[in-house]
Image (spheres, rainbow, N blue to C red):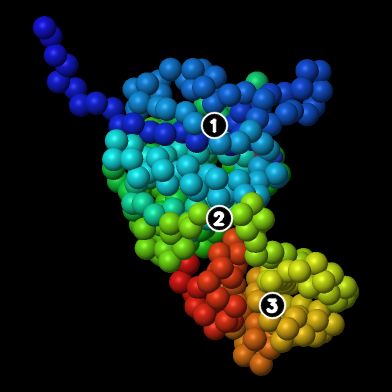
């Protein structure tokens, strides 16, 4: 009997959550519906995937990622951890809408304990569009997840022939396929029709060395959406009303998407200082999309008990603070987390 000597292809678990990659255009209209297709149909449309890996699909959600929430993050993290703990699985790919992909990627980067590749992938054009980007993105994502050199780089995102670190990636454009950018620290690598070039490894702690991994099981459904952390966007003429409203709504932490270097008006600063004295964690981030928010530049963080977001944009600062507040309310300890992750 003839025996094949070819090594078995790596087994990759694909966790499906929805998004445009599985979206269909609305007949006769300009819009489209996210999560209209199954990932099985997407995979069937790209037979070349069979040359890269043995794929097994597990549906986790079928949503546009604007509806992603902490309960779904927890479910996704649990399913990813279960797959990664299986010695037969080489890596995990997660299909996801692009709107909040950076937040999910960063969350998983902090809570999944593994050195195996975990890759998020989406698309900017629906599956039925002219020149849909989903099939090539999916092919490249599977190639990255199946590649041994993708190990221990933290959670990655593959889009538009680029490989991004979860910590660095941000969505920067409403519609273009080149929407994702990785700012000052740059790309994790490039991927061209499945051929991969990795660059330097990530700079901050992640996955197997994260203090938040693995995620403890939530003991009640309400626990999975706590602690409440709100983002408040700063602007010229900013008052204190939204800060006070967030405090009244039960927020345990606030992220200020500050102007410039994480600044906010005198009125807003007073409200934040009062909130910090009342025990809330106040993180100053920036709405600019680049740069570092440092401590004690124009605002006396030491005096007010504020936390500087370092390099994290407001939405990623929120992810870290949600996790950090499950451990401590101490602003010094929380500040250390922003310097560590
Ligand atoms: N808003 C949808 C989502 O994030 C579609 C955008 C996309 O996937 O590109 O799931």
Q: Depth check: 255 or 133 in front?
A: 255
Which residue in the rendered view is the most extreme toward the left? 1
Q: For the residue carrying disc 2, how many other residues have a C-alpha within 10 Å: few (<14), some (14-19), or many (20+)?
A: few
**Residue 220: in sight, yes or no?**
yes
Which residue is disc 3 drawn over?
A: 280
Question: What secondary structure is marked by label 3?
Answer: loop
Left or right: where 258 falls relative to 324: right
Q: Residue at x 77, y 85 (%)?
A: 274
Where is residue 320 drawn, in percent x and y?
56, 65
Q: Residue at x 69, y 64 (%)?
A: 228
Which residue in the rendered view is the most extreme toward the front? 219
For label 3, being within 8 Å of ligand 1 is answered no
Which residue is disc 1 drawn over?
A: 59
Where is residue 260 drawn, in percent x and y?
70, 73
Q: Residue at x 47, y 67 (%)?
A: 341
| Spatial CA span between label 3 and label 1 | 37 Å
């Amino acid at each position: 009997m003839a025996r094949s000597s070819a090594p078995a292809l790596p087994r990759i678990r694909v966790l499906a959550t929805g998004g445009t990659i599985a979206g269909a255009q609305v007949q006769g209209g300009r819009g489209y519906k996210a999560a209209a297709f199954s990932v099985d149909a997407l995979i069937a449309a790209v037979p070349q995937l069979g040359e890269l890996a043995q794929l097994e699909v597990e549906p986790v959600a079928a949503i546009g990622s604007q509806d992603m929430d902490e309960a779904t993050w927890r479910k996704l993290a649990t399913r990813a951890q279960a797959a990664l703990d299986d010695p037969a699985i080489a890596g995990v790919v997660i299909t996801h809408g692009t709107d909040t992909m950076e937040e999910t990627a960063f969350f998983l980067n902090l809570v999944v304990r593994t050195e195996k590749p975990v890759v998020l992938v989406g698309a900017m054009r629906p599956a039925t569009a002219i020149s849909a980007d989903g099939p090539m993105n999916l092919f490249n994502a599977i190639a990255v997840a199946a590649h041994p050199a993708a190990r221990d780089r933290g959670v990655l995102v593959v889009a538009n022939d680029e490989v991004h670190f979860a910590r660095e990636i941000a969505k920067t454009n409403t519609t273009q396929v080149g929407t994702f950018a990785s700012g000052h620290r740059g790309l994790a690598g490039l991927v061209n029709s499945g051929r991969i070039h990795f660059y330097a490894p990530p700079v901050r702690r992640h996955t197997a060395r994260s203090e938040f991994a693995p995620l403890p099981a939530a003991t009640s459904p309400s626990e999975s959406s706590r602690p409440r952390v709100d983002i408040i966007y700063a602007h010229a003429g900013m008052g204190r009303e939204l800060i006070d409203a967030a405090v009244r709504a039960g927020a345990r932490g606030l992220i200020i998407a500050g102007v410039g270097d994480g600044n906010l008006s005198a009125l807003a600063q007073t409200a934040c200082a009062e909130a910090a004295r009342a025990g809330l964690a106040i993180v100053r981030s920036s709405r600019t999309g680049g740069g570092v928010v440092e401590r004690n530049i124009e605002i006396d963080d030491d005096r007010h008990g504020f936390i500087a977001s370092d390099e994290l944009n407001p939405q990623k600062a929120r992810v870290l603070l949600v996790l950090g507040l499950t451990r401590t309310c101490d602003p010094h300890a929380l500040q250390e987390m922003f310097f560590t992750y």
